[in-house]
Image (cartoon, rainbow, N blue to C red):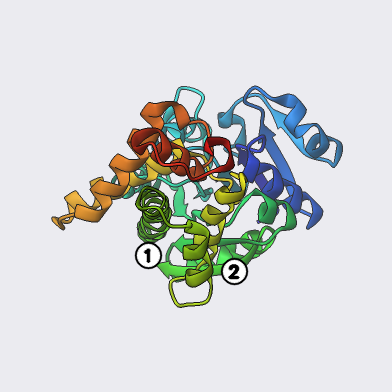
Amino acid sequence: MKHIGFIGASGLMGHGMSKNLLAKGFDVSLTVHRNKDGVADLLAAGGRQVARPADLGACDVVILCVTGTPQVEAAMLGADGVLSQARSGLIVIDTSTSEPESTQRLADLCASQGVTLVDAPLARSAMEAEAGKLNTMVGATPEVFAQIKPVLQAYCENIFHVGGPGAGHIIKLLNNFVAQAICTATAEAFAVGAKAGVDVQQLVNVISAGGVNSGLFQAMAKTLNGDFTGLKFGLDNARKDLRYYSHLAEMVNVPSLVGQSVHQSLATASALGHGNSFVPALVTAQEQLTGAKITPASR
């Protein structure tokens, strides 16, 4: 497990992951999508650029760090995709947040070519990626998990083997549903409080001292001071994840009343023009919808 192929190294998470793999002594070959400037330091540190995902098929491991299912399928199944020239024995680690149904279909297709697909999505932010302190939840057999653990340790602080193939993406969607439910509820509470005439900073003070408190709540609370960077996670990415979660709930025949509401809250904020902003823009969306004055810009 020494030669690592990487797809998505120019992204916020992928850059830090690739950097740490190189620093830990792995040989890293990477594709460059558009932004070569974003990987210049990786190439200077010994990373090798390849022209196509197919050129990574001879690696020991290929890591995918892209947006979601369409991008994963394109990187794997396209005419120049990894599977077009994958050697038997290759392990592909999908660190993206993908649809479990697609993951299972892709895993079956990989297996038919002697390739193993592992789902190992990530938690934490680009800052932890640069520091090599991401969290990952891994869906793999125990034997494959043991093989790839040294690779994961190059960029992760906490590694959770959550079950067999597919379990990683399921756990990630559950995690992101709970996370976005907290963010959505916080933005709505701020709007209701502001419209009801109370100082919502007092709500922050109360929650900060009790069991409702969390890092996500504190990230949202920073918007009261005009800081929308407490949670550096794109709103449209969150919307995509909640769409995947809602689909998962439908597939297992579980009503998703809260999940659908959270998804629609994110979809509304995106429709209002905040899709390219970070998730805390949910607060601005509430201001637009309700006329509430929550953030310094609206007062």
Residue at (19, 53) in percent of width and height:
257
- The answer to whether residue 134 is seen in the rendering is yes
Q: Quadrant of residue 176?
A: bottom left
SS assignment at label 2: strand
Q: Quadrant of residue 43?
A: top right
Relative to 78, is 155 on the left or the right? right
Relative to 271, is 158 on the left or the right? right
Mark 2 or mark 1, earlier in chain: 2
Q: Is residue 82 shown above or below 202?
A: above
Q: Quadrant of residue 50?
A: top right
The numbered dot on residue 227 is: none
- Residue 214: x, y in percent? 50, 67
Q: Residues within 10 Å of mark 2 (few under 14, many from 20)?
A: few
Relative to 202, is 247 on the left or the right? left
Relative to 202, is 259 on the left or the right? left
The numbered dot on residue 158 is: 2
Residue at (42, 52) in percent of width and height:
190
Q: Amino acid at mark 1?
A: Gly
Residue nearest the observer in this picture, 153 or 131:
131
Residue nearest the observer in this picture, 157 or 116:
157
In this view, the residue farthest toward the bottom is 210
Q: Nearer the viewer, mark 2 or mark 1?
A: 2
| Quadrant containing the N terminus in the rendered view | bottom right
- Residue 206: x, y in percent? 48, 71
Cα distance between the residues tagged 2 and 1: 18 Å
Residue nearest the observer in this picture, 174 or 229:
229
Residue at (31, 48) in percent of width and height:
262
The numbered dot on residue 164 is: 1
- The answer to whether residue 243 is seen in the rendering is no
Q: Amino acid at mark 2?
A: Asn
